Image (cartoon, coloured by chain):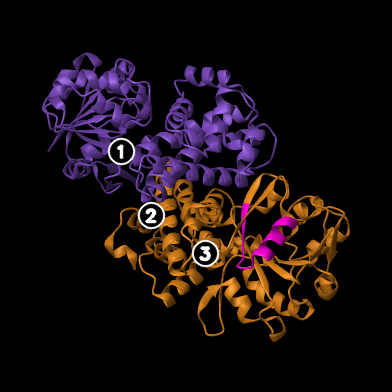
Chain colours: A purple, B orange
Amino acid sequence: MAHITILGAGFMGSALTIPATDNGHCVALWGTWLDDHMVEALQKGDPHPKLRLHLPPAVAVYYSTDLAEALRDADLVVNAVTSDGTLPVLRRTFPCLIPGTPVMSVSKGLLRRRDGKVDTISVNILEHLPRALRGKFRLVVVGGPSKAMELARRVPTAVLYASQDASARRLARELFQTAYYSIGEIADVRGLEICAAFKNAYAIAVGLCDGLVKAGRWEATNNTKAALFVQAIREIGTLLRSVRGDAATLTGLAAVGDLFVTGVAGRNRTFGEMRGSGMATDEVVAELQARDELTEGYAAIRMGRAFVRHRRIQNLPLLEALYRIVYRDADVERELRRVVFGDPAGGQ
Amino acid sequence: MAHITILGAGFMGSALTIPATDNGHCVALWGTWLDDHMVEALQKGDPHPKLRLHLPPAVAVYYSTDLAEALRDADLVVNAVTSDGTLPVLRRTFPCLIPGTPVMSVSKGLLRRRDGKVDTISVNILEHLPRALRGKFRLVVVGGPSKAMELARRVPTAVLYASQDASARRLARELFQTAYYSIGEIADVRGLEICAAFKNAYAIAVGLCDGLVKAGRWEATNNTKAALFVQAIREIGTLLRSVRGDAATLTGLAAVGDLFVTGVAGRNRTFGEMRGSGMATDEVVAELQARDELTEGYAAIRMGRAFVRHRRIQNLPLLEALYRIVYRDADVERELRRVVFGDPAGGQ
C-alpha cells in the first residue's frame, strides 16, 4: 500500500482518488485556498460538490493550511491544481518534499516564465525548483482524453503518462492503473504537454460551430466541425514539431483523442458555443465565471499565441482566427470560413 | 458551362447538384430503379424527399429508363449510387460513355471481385471496364467529411478528390469547388478509398458507446469514445499501410475528418447506438431497413474483415470486436473493454 498525496480537490484531483483507492492505496487529498467549500463538504461526509459522488473512506481530506501534514510520507505527489495555481502551490510544496519523490502533474496549460516567454508547465516547474531538489526531481506528466466525471464513475478511460524517468512513470502507472483506467507510458513530455495545452484552445473552434447552429445560421455544421478538427490536428502537428515532439504523439490519445473528447463535451466547447451563438467574449467570460466554469481554453488561446509568436511558428491560421474571434471580437463565421477555405491571408 | 451527369438521386448525388449549378453548370440527375419515388417527386416540382429541399432549376431529372439520354454530352459523370449499386449501374453506363470522359465516384465501400477477394470500388470498376474504355478511363474518387444534408444547405465543407490523373481531378475540382465546398487534390486513390470504406465500420464503435449510455450503463462515455476513436485511427493507419497509402492521408480529412463526422452524426452512429443499447443485430437491421436507413457500416464490418483476412493484416482488435459484436452478438461492453485495455488475446 502506498501513500499518495493529491494537491487540488477539484474535478481531476478528486477523481484520481477512485483508481488510487481501488488499488488499495491511501490518499491524502489536499484542497487549495480556493477549495475550502469542497474540503468542508467532504469532511462533513457529503458528496464531492463538483463530482457529485462520495469519495472512498480511504481518502483523508486536508484544508489548505495543512499542506505539510498532507504531504507526510507521500510515495508520490500529484499536482492537480489549475495551471495558474501550479507554481504557487508547488512553491509551498517543495520544502516538504523528500528529494526523489515522484511528482505527477495533471495540470494542462502554458505559463509565462521569468524571462517573459511562455512555455509548458514542466519547463516552468523545473525553473522554480529549489536547489535541494535540482537533479532529484522526478516529474510525470499526464495527458489524453479523460473527463474527471467519467473517470470517477469508472467509465473505461485510456490516458498517457509521460516522463523521461522510466521508473517514475512506471511507478505512477502501477499506482493508478485499474481495470477501467488504462495508462500508456511515453517519454515525450513536451509533446504531450503541447497537445494538452493547445487542445483546450482548439476545442473552442468545434464549439463555435455549435454556436452558429444555436444562432439559427444552419441546422447542423458537422462538415465544418470536421474540417476544423482536421485543421486543429494539422496545427497541433506543427506545434509538436516545434518542440521536437514525437510524431506518434499526434495520432494517439494525446492529440486526436484528447481533442475529440474536449471538442464533443465539456466547458471549452461550451465557451465556443456561447461565443459562436453571438455573445461577446466579455459576456461569455462573465457568465462562465459566475458559474465557476470559465475554462482553460480561453487563456490557452492568448498564451498559445504568445508561445507561437516568441518562437516565430508559422501557418497556424486556426489559432490566429480563434485569437481574433475571442480577443478581438471578430466575426465568427467569416473567420472560420477563411480557415476552411485557406484564404492565403488567413495565416497571420 | 459544362454538362454534368450524376448517377443516383439519393442524398449525395442530389446534394452535389447544388455546388454544380451554383457554378453555372447544367446537371442531369439520373435516378436508379430504386429512386423512382425521388424522381417522381422532383419532376412534380416537390422538394427532394431525402434532402427536404427544392433542387435548382438547372437540374434535369431522369428516370432509370432514360440513362442514355441522361448521359448525352456529359463532360463529367458522377457515380453516386450505393457501393452495391455501383457495378450494375456502371455496366449500363459504359456503352454510352465517350472514352476519356472523367468519372467521379462518391460511393464508399468494399466489393467482392470476380476471384472472390474483397477490394475497393476503384479496383472493382477497373476490373469491369469494357475493352473500349481500357486505358481511357479517368477515375476521380471523393472522400472526406461531407454530410449531404449540410452540403446541400451550403454549410462550409472541405473534402478531397483523389486521382492518379491530375488533369481529371483538376477538372472535377474546377466544376464543383465553391465558396462553401473546398476541394483538396491528392493522388492517393487507394488510401482515400480505404479511409472512406472503413470509417463507416469504425463509426459504429463510437455509436456503441452512446448505446451503453442509453441502456443506463453510464451517464456518459466520452472517455471510452475517445479511446476507441484513437484505436480506429490506429487501425485505419495499419490498413492504409497495407495498400501503400500515403501516411498524410491518415491525419487529414480522409481519416480523422471523416471518422469524426461519421462518429458524431449519422446513420452508422445510430446503428451502433441501437446495438449498444441492447438490441440484437437482427432487430437493428430490421428496424433500419424498414426506415430505409440501413447504413453502409453494417456491411463494411463484414467486408472489411474479409479484406483483412485475405491480406493477413494483423493487429486490428477493434475491427475484430466490431465483427463479434455485430455478427456474433457478442457482449458490447466486454468487447470494447478488451480493445481499450489491450487484452493480448483481443487481436484475433
Q: Secondary structure at mark 2?
A: helix
Task: Kindly identify the residue that appears in the image at 60 percent across and 72 percent down.
Answer: B122
Q: Where in the figure is residue B337, as x and y percent of width and height?
A: 34, 54
Q: Where in the figure is residue B211, as x and y percent of width and height?
A: 48, 51
Name the foreground residue: B279 vs A255. Answer: A255
Q: Specify the segment rendered in magenta.
A: B159-175
Give the letter of the chain under mark 2. B
Residue B48 shown left or right of residue B213 in the figure: right
2 vs 1, front mark? 1
Q: Quadrant of the N terminus of chain A?
A: top left
Q: How busy is the neighbourhood of tag 3: few (under 14 within 10 Å), some, or many (20 plus)? A: many
Residues tagged 3 and 2 counted as in contact (Cβ below 8 A): no
Residue annotated with mark 2: B333
Q: Where in the figure is residue B159, as x and y percent of width and height?
A: 62, 53
Asked if residue B156 is among those painted magenta in the image, a careful observer would answer no
Q: Quadrant of the C terminus of chain A?
A: top right
Residue A83, picture quadrant: top left
Residue annotated with mark 3: B191
The residue at the far front in this view is: A312
Report the Cα–Cα distance between label 2 and label 1.
26 Å
Residue annotated with mark 1: A142
Asked if residue B172 is among those painted magenta in the image, a careful observer would answer yes
Residues tagged 3 and 1 counted as in contact (Cβ below 8 A): no
- Name the kind of residue labelled 1 in the image: Val
| Residue A325 visible at all | yes
